[in-house]
Image (cartoon, coloured by chain):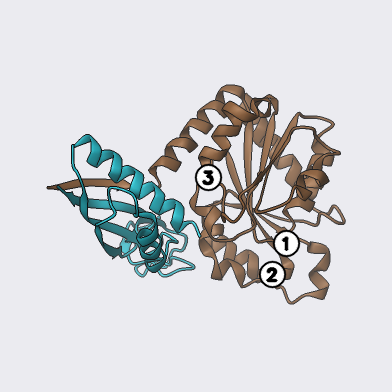
Chain colours: A brown, B cyan
Amino acid sequence: MRVYLAKNLREANKNSAADNRKILGEHGVLMVNMMGSPGCGKTSLLEETLKRLSPKYRLAVIEGDLYTAEDAQRLKPWTSEIVQINTEGACHLEANYIGHLLTQNSPSLLDAEILFIENIGNLVCPAEFDLGEDIRVTLLSVTEGNDKPRKYPLAFKETGAILITKLDLLDYVNFNLERATLDLKIINERSVIFPLSAKTGEGVETWCNWLESLLKKKRK
Amino acid sequence: MHELSIVSSLIEIIATDAREKGLQEVTFVRLIIGALSSANPRAIEFALEHAKSGSILEGASFEIVVEEAQSKCVNCATLFEPQLPFLMCPSCGTPSSSFEKGREIYIDYYEGE
């Protein structure tokens, strides 16, 4: 007996993502999925972002790492709503993990106005798994080199914002900001690009203002 | 490494469907992997061989077909085989096109008795 299914193997994840999107919509929570290589500066940028936004908004974070709760510890001064996920080897987060947190383990995450997800440091797999986020952002640090968007185009193609981080190191590394920006615009013309430095604070305000505008649009 | 989660999903979907249809075993599965799905066919094959044991798919063989990717130009709607990273339309030169085919992984059909 032959059975035609034509069934998408990522369908289960897509369904969970749609469920998450619905719950987040009902609670007016803006969910931001942050992706990028290990060491591209996701946690440092989150520290600076939380520092600026926490006086004004209720913030929450889901931290994804293979091991340790070090990142959750780093962010504690800025919010008490932090959940650390340790995937113990898995290379990305999936929508059902997030759904489980929102509905079962940590429903207080839904009291936040902005929920940040720091995805597993990886430029390949996280891009394949929708988590139900409102906006996906991909980080590219200047120390990684401006060839990375060409080498890992899908991580930059399917994202709403690209953050070029560690701008304070630009004079010390072989990174052509103009060329990188041009490549990124060709790969993804819809994405906004924010060059910034979590260390000096350059550009962080602009990024935070943009997040605020997304939140206002969502809660209108 | 996400090939394992794809394979677990495949086994679950087929096992559920086969049980609903009252089948005793699944003998063959045809799987389509998009050329730009970021899943490696050899890794999928390897994961399948390990993950199928103990399931209704234990005795199944697998055919994995790689589906060519296809893009559609956002400007002139030409269909073409995309070349990453820029997905430049061969007809009008516009970059940043969308994907029509080749990003998905799906089960075409399975056979069982």
Above or below — where is A66 with respect to A12?
Answer: below
Percent position of residue A52, x then y:
83, 40
- Residue picked out by circle 2: A144
Horizontally, residue A40 falls left or right of residue B5, namely right
* Three-letter code for the amino acid on which mark 1 is drawn: Gly
Percent position of residue A8, x then y:
34, 47
Q: What residue sits 69% from the left and 24% below the top?
A: A111
Residue A188 seen in this snapshot: no
Q: Earlier in the sequence, mark 3 or mark 2?
A: 3
Foreground mark, 3 or 1, reads 3
Give the quadrant of residue A28.
Answer: top right
- Residue picked out by circle 3: A94
* Three-letter code for the amino acid on which mark 2 is drawn: Glu
Residue nearer the viewer, A48 or A95: A95
- Residue picked out by circle 1: A39
Crowd band around label 1 with a 10 angstrom C-alpha radius: few (<14), some (14–19), many (20+): some
* Three-letter code for the amino acid on which mark 3 is drawn: Glu
Q: Earlier in the sequence, mark 3 or mark 1?
A: 1
Horizontally, residue A208 falls left or right of residue B20, namely right
Q: Helix, strand or loop at disc 1? A: loop
Q: CA distance from mark 2 to mark 1?
A: 9 Å
Percent position of residue A179, x then y:
64, 71
Q: What residue sits 31% from the left and 52% below the top?
A: B106
